[in-house]
Image (spheres, rainbow, N blue to C red):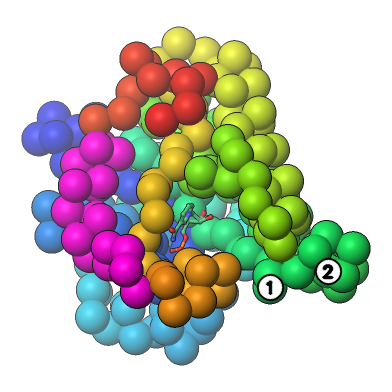
Amino acid sequence: MNKDDKRSVLLTGVTRGLGAAMLEKFLSMGHSVAGCGRSKDKIDALSKRYPGAHLRAVDVSDFAAVSQWKTAVLADMGTPDLLLNNAALINENLPLWEVPVDEFAAVIDVNIKGVFHVVKAFTPAMIEAGHGVIVNFSSGWGRSTAADVAPYCATKWAIEGLSAALAQDLPSGISAMAYNPGIIHTEMLESCFGEDAKSFPNPKTWAESQVPYLLSLGAKQNGRPV
Ligand SMILES: NC(=O)c1ccc[n+]([C@@H]2O[C@H](COP(=O)([O-])OP(=O)(O)OC[C@H]3O[C@@H](n4cnc5c(N)ncnc54)[C@H](OP(=O)(O)O)[C@@H]3O)[C@@H](O)[C@H]2O)c1
């Protein structure tokens, strides 16, 4: 943590949903944020709106792109104090055997390999700095299951195991945990809940309580599902 308690936050998936709401809230609290998403037009619009943020169009499933982004982030913002692996995809609602092969692969590539790529790129700098917190976004469906979302469930259960094992790899001073954000009205929720998604809180309201909570995570929660 910086002396003035202002953190450097690395956040994937800032172009909509929870990521966009977290970006706004972290910046409003005076923290530095480096963020990414695939949609170049949305990244360009967010860069104009938040000129102080380090935003870039990066696909987390592409390790070469994540590595290049890491070099730019470390030069521009410095080592992240808080790394939030938020970016993810959900499959279109279907029984597992009807899920297209390419769609299954994409969900795995982003939700598991993307998290690995970001951890692989940034953790060495965090270890060198001697401190940091890595939060991997899981889901209620990383701890339970439902029909029609088996690919997504598989990836979020993987994130639970990956995060607990990562916590055992990390040296003292660095923590990692899987985080279930709750149920929030985003495009992802509309994809799986349809019209019912509207009855859940919006991302801005969610971020008001959850950004302070994410900032509070540390050694006490290391390796534990939160
Ligand atoms: N909403 C909920 O109720 C809920 C519940 C449980 C868990 N979660 C978890 O919370 C996180 C955020 O979910 P959300 O509801 O905000 O989802 P969302 O509205 O679909 O937003 C997902 C974000 O991830 C980005 N993204 C997707 N693939 C990417 C890639 N390959 N590289 C970089 N960025 C990528 C998207 O931007 P681009 O399309 O521009 O790349 C977008 O900004 C996810 O991990 C999700 O599993 C959400």
- Where does residue 92 sit, x and y in percent of width and height? 68, 73
Name the quarter where the N terminus is drawn: top left
- Residue beneath label 2, please? 99
- Residue beneath label 1, please? 92
The one of 98 and 158 positioned closer to us in this rendering: 98
Specify whether 145 is left or right of 197: right
Assign a secondary structure to mark 1.
loop
Span of residues in magenta: 198-215
- Where does residue 177 sit, x and y in percent of width and height? 48, 29
- Which secondary structure dominates the residues rendered in magenta? helix
Q: Amino acid at mark 1?
A: Glu
Q: What label does residue 119 carry, if any?
A: none
**Residue 203 located within the stretch drawn in magenta:** yes
The answer to whether 72 is drawn above or below residue 47 in the figure is above
Assign a secondary structure to mark 2.
loop
Q: Earlier in the sequence, mark 2 or mark 1?
A: 1
Specify whether 64 is left or right of 223: right
